[in-house]
Image (spheres, helix red, strand yellow):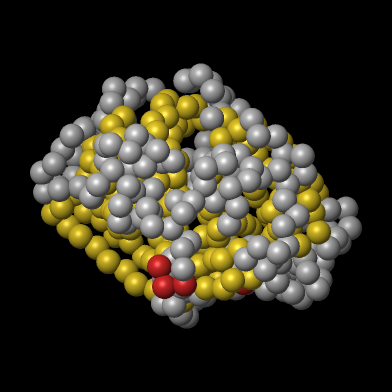
Amino acid sequence: MSLFPLGIIGQGGGAAAGSFELIETANGTGSSGIIDFTSIPATYKHLQIRYTAKNTSTSADLNITFNNVTTASYARHHVVGNSVSTASAAATSASNISLIDAVAPSTTANVTTNGVIDILDYAESTKNKTLRAMYGLIQAYSTSRIYLASGFLASTTAVSRVTLTASGNNFSTVSRFSLYGIKG
Amino acid sequence: MPVGVSAWTALANTTLASAANSVTFSGISGAYRDLRIVFSGGIGSSNASFTINGDTSSTYNWTTLEGNGSANSSAWNGDTFGSMANNYILWYNTTGILVTIDILDYATTDKHKTILSRGNNTARAVNAVVNRWPSTAAITSFKFNGNATNFTAGSTFALYGLSA
């Protein structure tokens, strides 16, 4: 298996036949800001979440927790291009991995934020849990963003649950979250 | 797609026997959830771009994030023909270019099409790009444009579909 979870060259790519499987797809309902993937089997090497997201109101962050852990044991980094300049930010001792601006606002018709999130070695009990993400949104000149992000949970417990929560309001019905398992 | 079924399908693969100005994937089935496109190769002396469904009248806005070894930057452009990894990725570098492109929900008709790409140019830079085609139509064709110059012989273009 490639160093990259998807076989073909990194973020989001296709793996060899039979090694990349759909676990579950969840769609936004317009009345909930939570997507909860539970009882994730430990039979894969890595996980990948592919999503298109839109909020029912203003733009929102996408807050991720593993195994329903909400203690201050997460960290994150990101680098962002905002059409004009770049910036970087980080957080430690956080209660979740917050993907900043990862859910599009409702104000621009037909626009979603799209992203790919990889959770590496999620089932291993010998290492802390990490993820990487790439996501982006095109609206107007001043509100478009492309992000590369990483997240960390100081826990060696296998991940069996991944919860994605909008930092405000709900996921609109055009939102879609698909969880895939990648065999090693 | 039923849970647990293998998800990626190779839909098309083109290797240029000789330099060419464009490559088009057409007749793309709407049966998949996402598309992935991989370009590996080079281009002569102009930037490349892409066109979706033959649409050369819409504005494909894009935003980039790039590092070139000495500086990082972000840029925006409303380019009639769109960008392929900010065009920078194809700065007249005849070898060593690798671009991966993800188009999520390409066949749905309830949203515009957002394209995420990661570009790697061994002589120039690495970058990440988001690009939006402002149409709710399903994508049925994707064309790489060499514009004023050609993709080099040996360049490969591969298209994959991810089952829903």
Q: Please give the name of the residue rendered at 43% of the width and 58% of the height, measured from the top-left corner.
A: A108
Q: Please give the name of the residue rendered at 41% of the width and 73% of the height, measured from the top-left corner.
A: A142
Closer to the camera, B70 or B113?
Answer: B113
> Residue B30, can we see it?
yes
Q: State the image quarter where residue A162 is shown.
A: top left
Closer to the camera, B76 or A65?
Answer: B76
Q: Please give the name of the residue rendered at 38% of the width and 31% of the height, measured from the top-left corner.
A: A26
Closer to the camera, B146 or B77?
Answer: B77
Residue extending furthest toward the right? B18
* Percent coordinates x, y for residue A78 in the rendering: 33, 61
Give the vertical position of A90 relative to B24 (above or below): below
Q: In the displayed structure, does residue B52 sit left or right of residue A33?
A: right
* Percent coordinates x, y for residue B86 in the rendering: 59, 68
* Percent coordinates x, y for residue B87 in the rendering: 64, 69
Q: State the image quarter where residue A85 is shown.
A: bottom left
Residue extending furthest toward the left? A71
Q: In the displayed structure, does residue A73 sit left or right of residue B29?
A: left
Give the vertical position of B11 relative to A153 (above or below): above
Closer to the camera, B74 or B93?
Answer: B74
Q: In the displayed structure, does residue A10 sit left or right of residue B29?
A: left
> Residue B120, can we see it?
no
Q: State the image quarter where residue A58 is shown.
A: bottom left
Q: Please give the name of the residue rendered at 68% of the width and 73% of the height, measured from the top-left corner.
A: B91
Give the vertical position of A184 relative to B26 (above or below): above
* Percent coordinates x, y for residue B57 in the rendering: 71, 64
Q: In the displayed structure, does residue A101 sit left or right of residue A44?
A: left
How many discs appear? 0
